[in-house]
Image (cartoon, rainbow, N blue to C red):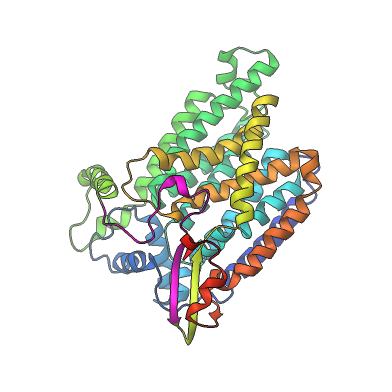
Amino acid sequence: MSEARPHPYRAAAALGVLAQLLFSYRLTIPTKLMFDETHYVPAARTLIALSGPTNIEHPLLAKEIIAGGILLFGDNSLGWRFFSTLAGTATVLGVFAIVLLMVGRVRPAVFGALFTLFNFTVFVQARIGMLDGFMAAFVVTGLAALLWAMRAPDGRHAWARWIGGAVLLGLAVAAKWIAAPLIAFAALGFILLRLHDARLRGRSVFAALNAGTNRHWPGMAAIPAVLVLGAVSIATYLATFAPAFFYLHDPMTLGTLLPFQKHMYDRQTMPLPKHPYQSGWWSWPIMVRPIWYLYERVDGAQRGVLLIGNVAILWGGLIAVAACLVEGVRARSPRLLAAAGLWLGSYAIWVVIPKKIGFFYYYYLPSIALCVALSLAFDHFPAARRRDTAFLAGVIALFAIFYPVLSAAALPGPGAFRYWTWSSTWV
């Protein structure tokens, strides 16, 4: 970490300012609800009024945050989206922290953050009132906190950071359930890294899983750490249902809190009608069917918002994941395996869950994981390291090309979409 110490805070501050300015510029356009804002903004209004349960297939937290924006800035496009910009900035800085803690150098951390910033998915989700942006922000910052605990100087600091990470991951689940398996993955990562350390140092499994003098997460035994991670995240998740106890109609009680979770699950897994933008999980990495969140004449001009990935990140990132996986196995490198595993884990969830319909925006969290894999691959392989700046320049150039249909800028006319729809399935 010695190389990183003089610079990370200044780099993080600059990245945070850049991200917040970029996400906030012309945030209020369009001034009408777009795409799934039509579900979540009305749900936030209902929460403000405490009228009763609505949009019950999802937990409350993300809608509570949107409601907070409405209370602060009014029931308008600034109120609906302001906190999404903060979530986007937190995601960028969270990736910076994750890479910095994994490799101990500022340069790859900056590249990881910039890949995240200019990966179109993060930009679009940072400018719309939806659930996924908040979920990802809590996941990324939560994982960063657990890695920070790994680097703690003593048990007291390790436990404090670990509990903070558990709270953040509980908040992620409270924004959207899909974050829940990542808590189990984090616990598994703790145990696997401890066992890896024990093998390198010739120590027993018993010593590795107890507090002892371990290199990572000092002063933390495995079983208490896993139990605390689970208990704190669950308690945090349940606490976010507090407003539901004050509904004017059908208020929640302690007796109905847990049964309500089953009702949510039933709503999540129920059959749904076909949607023109639905797509299968297998198609998301190759971006067969991106989504037009908006394409109409609004606010005095033809405008569009296309949720699509930066092809350099989405397709180049797959090569990076494969490279990290192969080299990680060959060199027995935990950091490379973790980079590949972050994408594999966040993507595989969608393969196995009993969801009846899928959309490209479900790929949001894996698209962020690609940025971590790219930054570690460029840092690890000497031949690639010489090309990281050129690759970033290409990423930024693509962002500039697509910016009009990422930002709801004024377009020449109704047929302008053809300039950005490079595949017939993108229309």
Using the image, determine if residue 315 lies above or below residue 149. below
389 or 73: nearer the eye? 389
Is 270 placed left or right of 303 in the picture? Answer: left
Q: How many marks?
A: 0
Percent position (x, y) of residue 306?
A: 50, 66
- Outermost residue, left direction? 250
**Residue 257 sits above or below residue 54 on the image:** above
- Residue furthest toward the front? 424
Residue 233 seen in the figure: no
Residue 39: percent from left, percent from top: 33, 65
Image side of residue 240 versus residue 344, left or right: left
Asked which quadrant contains residue 102, the reply is: top right
Q: Nearer the viewer, residue 386 or 100?
A: 386
**Range of the magenta residues?**
272-297
Q: Is residue 311 visible?
A: yes
Residue at the image position 80 percent from the left and 49 percent from the top: 6
* Quadrant in which the N terminus appears: top right
Q: Along the line of sight, which residue is nearer the eye, 259 or 34?
A: 34
Residue 156: say if magenta.
no
Height in image: 352 above or below 404? above
Q: Residue at x 39, y 67 (%)?
A: 35
- Residue 133's spot in the image, x, y percent? 48, 57
Which residue shows up at 32% across the image and 41% down it?
354
Question: Principal SS element in the magenta part?
Answer: loop
The image shows residue 172 at horizontal and vertical percentages of: 45, 48
Q: Residue furthest bottom?
A: 300
